[in-house]
Amino acid sequence: MEVYPRNKRNENAYIQNDKPLVVKVPHFNGDYLVDTVYTAIETLGGLNKKFRSGDSVIVKPNFNCPDPTPLSTGLDFLAAVFEILTDFGLHIKVGEMCGRAAWPTEDVVQKLKVLPVMKRYGVDFINFEKDDWIPVEISGDFWKVIHVPRTIYEATHRVYLPNMRCHSSARFSGAIKLGVGWLSPEDREIMHRDKDKTEQMIAEINLAFQPDIIIMDGRRSTVGWAGRGDYVYPNVVMASGDMVAIDTEAIKILKQYPSRNRIQIPIDEMKTLTTAQKHGLGKMDYQIIEMEPHLSTREKNNNDPAAIAVMNDL
C-alpha cells in the first residue's frame, strides 16, 4: 500500500511582532454570537489572509459524543461559523468521527441535531468512519505512520472548532486534541495503551496536516477530572492560526478555576504543548489581543442569525 507524505507545513498567516496571534473576545448572554465570532476573526486579520471566495474548506468540529456543549460543539456556534464562512463565499463540508464508545457517528450527529443546521447552510457531512483511510508517514518520536481520512488529508483548507475543557487522559481538550477525531480507530487504540505517551502522541498526529484557522468556543467549559461536571463560564471566544498558542492561552484561563484536574501543573510541563512546539506545530510564546465587547461592522438584523437558524431547526 502506498504511504503518503505528511502535508507541507501550513504557514500561519496570523502573526504580529514575529509571534503568533491569539484573539480573545468576550461573549455574554444576549450578545450576538455571529458578531462575537466575526469580531474574533476580523481582529485576527480576517479570512482573506488565508482564503478566497469560492474556496472549499473542511470544518472540523467536536462531535465525539452525544453530550451537549462544552463536550460537543454547540449548534449556535456551528451556525455562527457557517454564517460567516458562507457569507465570505466559502464552500463548506463538515468532517468528523465520534469516539468508539459512542459509535456510530450517524447516531451522535442525529442526537445532537446537527444535520438540520448543516442543511440550512447547504453544508455536506463527511462521516470519517466511512472515508477512505490512508497511511501517512509523519516520522515523529512516537509515531512513524498514522492512518487518516483521505478527505481531510487532501483538503485545500481546514477550519478547526475546538471547545475549551479539561480532559482525563489528555489533560486538556482543545485545538491540538481535536485531531483525534480524524485519527483511525486502530491508531486511537494504540495511542491510549501507554498513558505516559498519550499526550505526546496526540500532539504528533498533527504533523500530518494543520488547520488554517482555529475558532475556539470558551463560553462554557469544564474543569473537572474527567472533563464532565464542574462547569465554569469563561465567556470568551478565541481565534488563532496557531494551535499551540491558542491551547496555551485556553489552559491559562482554565487554571484560574480551582478544581481537581490534570492541568494544575506548570504550563511548560504540558506534554501536548511542549511536544507540538518541539515539532514546529506552534509556539507557546504568542501575542494576545483581548477585545472589549463591541458591535462589528456587519449588517445585523434584530436577532442573531445563528440563534434563529438553530431555533428554527430544532
Image (cartoon, grey):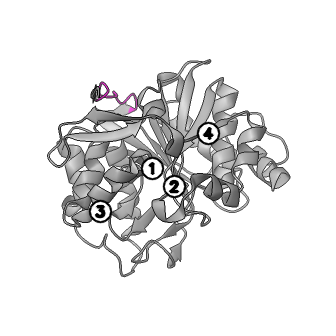
- Looking at marks 4 and 3 on the same chain, the residue that comes earlier in the sequence is marked by 4
Identify which residue, 43 or 304, lies in the foreground.
304
Q: Residues within 10 Å of mark 3 (few under 14, many from 20)?
A: some
The magenta stretch is 6-14
**Label 2 close to label 3 by CB (< 8 Å):** no
Question: What kind of residue is marked 2?
Answer: Cys
The residue under the point 63% across, 41% down is 81
- Whether 7 is among the magenta residues is yes
Q: Is residue 262 left or right of residue 94?
A: left
For label 1, the residue is 181
For label 3, the residue is 192
Find residue 35 and report its horizontal and vertical position in percent: 67, 44
For label 4, the residue is 38
Question: What kind of residue is marked 4?
Answer: Tyr
Q: CA distance from mark 1 to mark 3?
A: 14 Å
For label 2, the residue is 98
Identify which residue, 101 or 232, lies in the foreground.
101
Residue 287: image quadrant is: top left
The residue under the point 32% across, 27% down is 7
- Looking at marks 4 and 1 on the same chain, the residue that comes earlier in the sequence is marked by 4
**Label 2 close to label 1 by CB (< 8 Å):** yes
Give the numbered dot on residue 172.
none
Q: Secondary structure at mark 1?
A: helix
**Label 1 close to label 3 by CB (< 8 Å):** no
Q: CA distance from mark 4 to mark 2?
A: 28 Å
